[in-house]
Amino acid sequence: MKFMPGLDLCERFYRDAVSPILERHFPGLVHSAGRLGRGSDVLGFDTPTSMDHHWGPRVTLFLKGDDFDRYGESIPEVMSRELPYEVCGIPTNFCHQEARFGQLKAIESGPVSHGVSVTTTKAFFEGYIGINALDGLSALDWLLIPHQLLRTIASGRVFHDGLGELGPAREVLAWYPHDVWLYLLACQWRRIDQEEPFMARCDDVGDELGSRLVASRMINELMRLCFLMERQYAPYYKWFGTAFSRLECASILTPIFQSIFDSRNWREREQHLSTAYIQVAKMHNALSLTPHIEPELSNFHSRPYMVLHSERFVDALHGQIESEEVRLLPKHIGAVWQFADSTDVLDRLNRCRQLRVLYR
């Protein structure tokens, strides 16, 4: 099979195969269609290696509630009989009925175990992010959605929006409301503030490995801050660096981060880390979200460790929040993805929503 980007394949699958079948068997059926769920293809990061599993021609069809009740079972059955065995030279048949877990397998006869799913807009969003985007989201709703899921909705593709619902829903989810954004920025600066002096302190007592680990953590926190500053949802870790490389700030910060990794001792490491702090502080000022904050470093109390004193950014951002709902949130918790990094949490929406108790 010759590789083609998964989103392009899915769109061709819909237009060349799925849509004509709908027209023949369900003429005039109002629907929307797209590819918005999990997958490297949805993120636009798939390569030929991606083709070995969880990849292939798939599309989600969205129907009105009453049409879903009427056709929700018959459409997949018709598709299994009518779909061509390949599209763009790629099989439309998966090894397993649960196509999202399957591998592609070419067949020459019989029904197609396909990747066409049928749902409603409400059911999709409630199942995927825990709430129907068209019903509106509270500040807490935003915090309980892993950013990696929001990224797939933003980066996915709508092939047809006959219902007129997917476009507005994606607009709602395109980025955080302003005050929620300020809150997340403040919480991310707080994570940097908590550990600024630790890199030098570790090596100061002979813990070179600990110093390198803390420096790596600081790079990770700065990268997360950059995603927030550029109003981009970060993907899960497999694609975190790839997505970061496409940010505007990456051309400046990536060489600095590499120099931090390559540093031979804590003083050299501190010099490069300080350069990164200054650059990100300048990025903050360029956003004009708070009064200007001088991008300068100074000693951590009486110790000879140079830090940015990131609490200045934390306090300034919290001071700009106007929404009472957001101001009442615990000041330094942030979103679930800011304090939990377990895949078994962030990839399980019900577990994320159980963390609601932390915000009481």
Image (tube, grey):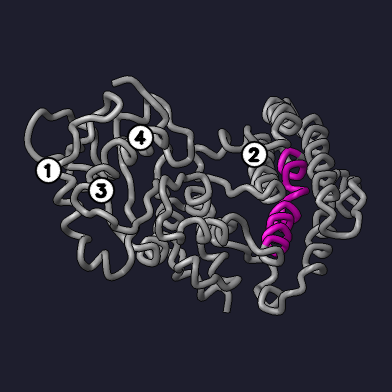
The first of marks 3 and 1 along the sequence is 3
Marker disc for residue 216: 2
**Residue 268 at least partly seen:** yes
Q: What's the distance in space between the residues labelled 4 and 3, CA to CA?
A: 16 Å
Q: CA distance from mark 2 to mark 3?
A: 55 Å
**Res. 81 mark:** 1
Q: Residue at x 69, y 28 (%)?
A: 258
Labelled pair 2, 3 in contact (Cβ < 8 Å): no
Q: Residues within 10 Å of mark 2 (few under 14, many from 20)?
A: some
Secondary-structure class at tag 4: helix
Q: Horizontal and vertical percent for residue 116?
A: 26, 47
Is 145 or 165 nearer to us in this picture? 165
Q: For the C terminus, give its image quadrant.
A: bottom right
Mark 1, mark 2: which one is toward the viewer?
Answer: 1
Considering only order in the chain, which callout, 2 or 4, is on the residue closer to the N terminus? Answer: 4
Identified by mark 1, the residue type is: Arg
Q: Main secondary structure of the magenta part?
A: helix
Amino acid type at image mark 4: Arg
Point out residue 294 in the picture as x, y percentages from the top left corner.
92, 50
Q: Amino acid at mark 3?
A: Glu
